[in-house]
Image (tube, rainbow, N blue to C red):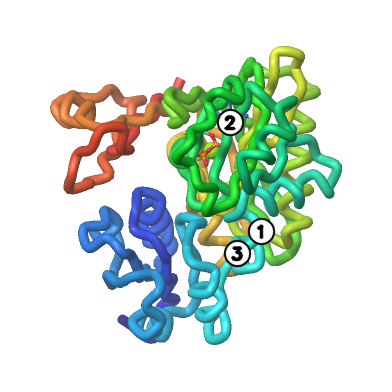
Amino acid sequence: MSKNQLVLGIIGGGQLGSMLCQAASRLKIKTFILSDDKNAPAKNFCNEFIHCNYKNLEEIKSFFEQVDIITFEFENIPFKTLENISKTKKVLPSPKIIEIVQNRQTEKKFINELDITTTSWALIKSKEDIEKNKHLLPGILKTCTLGYDGKGQYVLNTLNDIKDEWNFSSNYILEKLVDLKQEISVVVTRFFSGECVSFEPIENVHENQILKNSKIPANIDKKIYDQSQSSAKIIAQKLDFIGTMCVEYFIDKKNNLMVNEIAPRVHNSGHLTINAFIISQFENHVRAICNLDQIKNEKISNAEMINILGADIENYRKKSFKKNEFFFDYLKKDIKDKRKMGHLTILK
Ligand code: ADP
Ligand code: MG
């Protein structure tokens, strides 16, 4: 790789990694992806690629020695790995943030300490802990770590739903089931200067706990709009976040806003920013972590994004699209049920 070009290392090689590579490439920044999947889709979009286990510190060394700055596209990277890399190279956002956010208990505690409302929840280490917190039923039991797209989640309507085979070898949180009116997210980017910029709230629809579609503008009132923008910025500031992150919110039937979770990275609901704004969430992330100029963003259009899951991708691959429709194929080798295979953004 040429010596005078900045090289951005990205841990994780999924579609978010691919879109970060495309944004970096437009900014003339080279990309080097590290992934534990030898067929990682981002292989198609980066300049360099290394396949290795995220715990193999020896092999990871050959990756971080060749890059200038390191970032990541998912939060479930072993904290030890990030901490180890950060002794030699700048990792942004900081591994300390990942340590808080990759565990649902520390994440929720952090948000509550800022006086920002989340769902009601309790830490669960045993069957007895669930019994003690039965006021949270009906609820969802979620593993504290390693969950995504609804994985590691169990709905508990009554105490009878507790399964005998559960051995509670890892910690859980029990969250009260929210009577949902809507879900929204706010994508924010914080720069070295401390300045925070955010996209307008995005309205999200989930199916089977997986994001199905996102749209702007969100159909919300001014109170929810302002509250969601301001909480997301407070969270980014208090985390001392550099780069792009996303706050997912629930709105209940009584119009109460509560934080669901923080994604310390670019987010699926922000895909529509690629076509609907002059600067996408991905470009903003690269600009922030590489300390490039912050450019004033402008909205081009309202938009809707549809996630394409599993075998449905084959239908989309055959389709022709209108001028306002933008199809993204993640080029994943294997089609699996419910796997995110691509997305379509429609400008409206
Ligand atoms: P993941 O880390 O898998 O994204 P989330 O906690 O965001 O997990 O849950 C995924 C989706 O499941 C949410 O976006 C929402 O639609 C639904 N869900 C999760 N927790 C609750 C809850 N407490 N009440 C109602 N719906 C929930
Ligand atoms: Mg989520």
Residue 292, placed above or below residue 3: above
- Where residue 295 appears, as percent x and y from the top left, is 61, 53
Upstream in sequence: badge 2 or badge 3: 3
User: Ligand 2 shows up in which quadrant of the image?
Assistant: top right
Which is nearer the eye, 101 or 10? Answer: 101
Residue located 78% across and 30% down the image: 226
Mark 1 Cβ and ligand 1 under 8 Å apart: no
Query: How far apart are the two marked residues, 2 and 3, measured between alpha carbons?
Result: 29 Å
Give the residue pinned by disc 1.
100
Residue located 47% across and 79% down the image: 68
Label 2–label 3 contact, CB within 8 A: no
Residue located 56% across and 40% down the image: 142
The residue under label 2 is which amino acid type?
Ile
Mark 2 Cβ and ligand 1 under 8 Å apart: yes
The N terminus sits in image quarter:
bottom left
Give the residue pinned by disc 2.
140
Asked which quadrant contains residue 63, the reply is: bottom left
Give the residue pinned by disc 3.
93
- Where residue 78 appears, as percent x and y from the top left, is 49, 67
Q: Secondary structure at mark 2?
A: strand
Bin the neighbour count of mark 2 within 10 Å (Cα to Cα): few under 14, some 14-19, many 20 and up. many
Q: Secondary structure at mark 3?
A: loop
| Residue at the top extreme of this rendering | 253
| Residue at the left extreme of this rendering | 318
Residue located 27% across and 60% down the image: 37
Label 1–label 2 contact, CB within 8 A: no
Asked which quadrant contains residue 223, the reply is: top right
Upstream in sequence: badge 1 or badge 2: 1
* 322 left or right, relative to 76: left
The residue under label 3 is which amino acid type?
Pro
Residue 158, placed above or below residue 262: above
- Count of marks overlaid on the render: 3
